Amino acid sequence: DTGVSQDPRHKITKRGQNVTFRCDPISEHNRLYWYRQTLGQGPEFLTYFQNEAQLEKSRLLSDRFSAERPKGSFSTLEIQRTEQGDSAMYLCASSLGTGGRRGSLLAKNIQYFGAGTRLSVL
Amino acid sequence: ELKVEQNPLFLSMQEGKNYTIYCNYSTTSDRLYWYRQDPGKSLESLFVLLSNGAVKQEGRLMASLDTKARLSTLHITAAVHDLSATYFCAVHTGTASKLTFGTGTRLQVTL
């Protein structure tokens, strides 16, 4: 499977615990995004990486949230001291961006999404 | 702050009927996307619209973009049950790389 993969698919945790999610983007994609989706809503942007650099963060990303992409490949999203309001689907997406010679401008900017990690905080 | 509104939020339609989903956005955008999401599944890219007057078609779905009106439409022709899903429009603005999504339109096609 060459798509975006996320692990775990489901996570149940108790309030106050820390959780970490992993995202493996499509291999040649240099841009990686994290979104959060709550029931009945569209995804909301959290943060974005180009290679290993974190270039943009939403104000939704409180200081309890941290994301890394240390080698410009996979990324992790950690939530510390989880709260019930953190319960949501966390989606990762990747795009080719400006890198690479292959693909049209159109194809380079399409964000491809993973299946998500569903977090339930009890 | 960019706002993206879709309507209707829920659409129940019979097989064979036609209908249109509307997506309005509040600021200038250089790119608009349509995605499909099945329950418990990932978002699947359907269309990318880059310029005013752009029209894209795939099977029974056709998307168009009017940048002056800040409006995109997703037209469904002769709906079939397999089209049942939630459809999202998403707007890309300026140099930011994030997408701002609408709240989605849940489409239910009944036999």
Image (cartoon, rainbow, N blue to C red):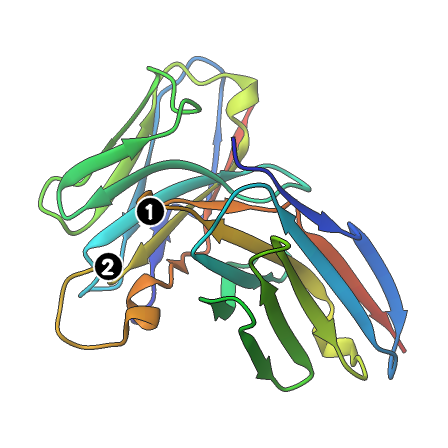
Q: Report the residue at 16% width, 52% height from top.
A: A73
Residue B107 location in percent, x, y?
Answer: 77, 62
**Badge 2 vs badge 1, beta-carbon distance below 8 Å:** yes
> In the picture shown, does residue B13 fall above or below A52?
below
- Which of the chains bears the disc numbered 2? A
- In 3D space, how far apart are the residues under numbered discs 2 and 1 (Cα atoms)? 9 Å
Q: Nearer the viewer, residue B70 or A57?
A: B70
Side of A5 relative to A83 (left or right):
left
Q: Amino acid at mark 1?
A: Ser
Q: Amino acid at mark 2?
A: Gly
Side of A1 relative to B19 (left or right):
left
Residue B87 location in percent, x, y?
Answer: 65, 60
Q: Report the residue at 24% width, 52% height from top.
A: A31
Q: Report the residue at 24% width, 59% height from top.
A: A97
Residue at the spot of label 1: B97
Residue A71: in sight, yes or no?
yes
Residue at the spot of label 2: A97
- On the rendered image, what quadrant is the N terminus of chain A found in? bottom left
> In the picture shown, does residue B56 fall above or below B85?
below
> In the picture shown, does residue B26 fall above or below A66?
below
Task: State the residue lying farthest toward the left.
Answer: A71
> In the picture shown, does residue B41 fall above or below B2?
below
Q: Report the residue at 54% width, 34% height from top.
A: A88
Report helix, strand or loop for mark 1: loop
Residue B47 location in percent, x, y?
Answer: 51, 71
